[in-house]
Amino acid sequence: MSIGWSRHGAQAWTGREVSSKAFMDELCSNVGGYRTFLHRLALQYFGWWVAIAVVPAVFLDHHRCESSMPYIAWCLYGGTVLAMLVMAVLVELSMVQRLGLLQASELHILKERRWRRPLASTVLWKLDSYTDMAFVFIARDCGSSLWWASLASIIFCTVFCQMIFNTCFALSDCDGELPESFGFVLLDFKLVNTAVRSVLPFDPDASDLPVAKPVTLKSSANLVGLEKVVGDVAQVCIQSLFLMSSSAPHGFVLFSVVVGALNGCLSIVLIVQDALQAEWAVQDRDLEQGTVLASLSGEKKILQEGSCSEMPKELPREREGGPSPERLGRSLDDDDML
């Protein structure tokens, strides 16, 4: 296995057979190996959740309801949220750059089509998670008991399903079901996942058996997306109940509902799109296999017909006058002689 550089600055991999562990170890050599890479991703993952819990707890005015806060305060608060989003995206891009998959002078590649979907999904998810966490403090400050329901949804869907389960499965490569050293995809850093997939010299979801793998990278990513959809549905319902039960306008909560709905719809669209692409790929493969089998059966039939045509239809006779019958093991000539 050898390594070079492509025209986009990404590492170009060549070799007949490359194991997933060897590939990730060499790819992450600039960051200290795959384990260091995975630990840094996990640290960024937990750091984001800590940040979105600390910022609203510290900066929000908990002595008044959200609807009575001045607009200048919300402008400053919105600027803080925007700065956090930009910082989170830049931190993820810095990890991609340290892997050697993105050069500092080539940030214009984010305008490419393959980067638009992961970038939009990353921004929407981070913004959605922030607004959901801030709603807990807003509902509590406004005297609504729905903050308990929102907090319970965050604890179940985020803390247990995403933070604990996904991190444990990422560290163990989904208990060995995923290709070795590919558990980082469960942390759902979409920019990192897209960058790594773009330089893979092999298909990590390919199976050596006639049947497909039960757990693949795409199915794992879709499962993580479904976890987020469940959390979005719960938060949108709770926040909608808060808006219907409140007489005062709550612009931030309405914005949170819109962001949650958009993030959930985008996740569903991506899951359905991946499922359709996988189904079309299976159908195309079955069609190719059917065509190959049909051609092989046709060639076999032609060979059989050719071999049959070369065989003589009847054995040559000894005399033109007719056959020489035998009776009881003796010929007629023998009887005449007797």
Image (cartoon, rainbow, N blue to C red):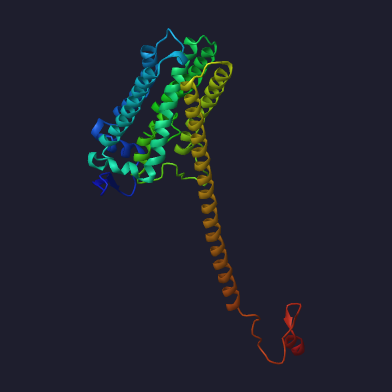
Q: Residue furthest top?
A: 63
Rendering coords of residue 69 (x, y %)? 42, 14
Decide: is 172 above or below 26: above
Q: Residue at x 65, y 80 (%)?
A: 313
Observer-nearest residue: 219 or 1? 219
Observer-nearest residue: 290 or 57? 57
Rendering coords of residue 80 (x, y %)? 34, 22
- Classify residue 1 as left or right of residue 246: left
- Quadrant in which the C terminus is drawn: bottom right
Q: Residue at x 46, y 21 (%)?
A: 252
Q: Residue furthest bottom?
A: 321
Report if residue 169 is visible in the image.
no
Rendering coords of residue 42 (x, y %)? 35, 25
**Quadrant of residue 191 in the image?**
top left
Q: Residue at x 34, y 36 (%)?
A: 21
Rendering coords of residue 105 (x, y %)? 23, 41
Observer-nearest residue: 246 or 35? 246
Q: Residue at x 46, y 45 (%)?
A: 208
Decide: is 102 above or below 136: below
Report if residue 279 is visible in the image.
yes
Observer-nearest residue: 79 or 215? 79
Q: For the image shown, how many numbered marks are present on the structure?
A: 0
Decide: is 86 above or below 64: below
Decide: is 38 above or below 108: above
